[in-house]
Amino acid sequence: MTPSDRKPPAKPRDDPSRRSRSSNEDARANRSSRGVSRPQLDELDIAIIRQLQVDGRMPFSKLGPLVGLSEGAARQRVARLLESGRMQVAAVVDPLASGSQLMALVGVRTSGDTRKIARAISELPEAIYVVVISGSFDIVVELVCDSNSHLLDVVTEGLRSLPGVATTETFMYLDVCKHVFTYAVR
């Protein structure tokens, strides 16, 4: 065999030149207008997430072939999605079926750093969903409580006592008509 007959050595899998963009280019492409990095999902990520929304306990030996990957590659992709925070796999419990007596949505108006106040509200164990929003409220909080008096305590002593909370408005759930986590991933 002559030197010209030899194949060039294979590039290692983690060789940056094999990637379509550098990590700096990825970071720039994923930045929002405020300069905050927003990781993008590629088609394989979306396919994996869609399968796991149907069955979060699906074995990698089944998941891989469904999305066109080997078992090991599927395991690595899922690990990256979990580590990056772009996906969570969790058991979802209906709070009302698991012993809690009521759920409520609370609109919060603030008079300070809304993000800081939202982080403080997120520390309340009864708060299961905290969102900074636009509109007549600055923050919306979903609470799960054991009783009306528990809800009153959380709103009065937990929410309204926080510095920067100007007003709250509480909406008690009378019936939960739809509560799903299998929404479309794009």
Image: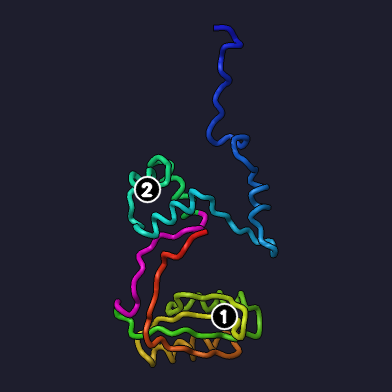
| Image location (x, y in percent) of residue 179 | 39, 74
Residue mark closest to the camera, 1 vs 2: 2
| Image location (x, y in percent) of residue 58 | 33, 52
- When asked about the image quadrant of residue 147, the answer is bottom left
Tally of numbered tags = 2
| Image location (x, y in percent) of residue 186 | 52, 59
Provide the secondary structure element on which disc 1 rests. strand
- Distance between mark 1 and mark 2 Cα atoms: 38 Å
Amino acid at circle 1: Ile
State the residue at coordinates (62%, 40%): 20
Provide the secondary structure element on which disc 2 rests. helix
| Image location (x, y in percent) of residue 87 | 47, 58
The label shown at residue 139 is 1
| Quadrant containing the N terminus in the rendered view | top right
Query: What's the image's color scheme?
Result: rainbow
Identify residue for label 2: 63
Amino acid at circle 2: Leu
Which residues are the magenta region?
A: 84-98
Report if residue 85 lies within the magenta region: yes
Name the residue nearer the viewer: 59 or 51: 51
Direction from residue 57 to residue 151 in the image, left or right = right
The label shown at residue 74 is none
Direction from residue 183 to residue 132 in the image, left or right = right
**Overall secondary structure of the magenta section:** loop
- When asked about the image quadrant of residue 90, the answer is bottom left
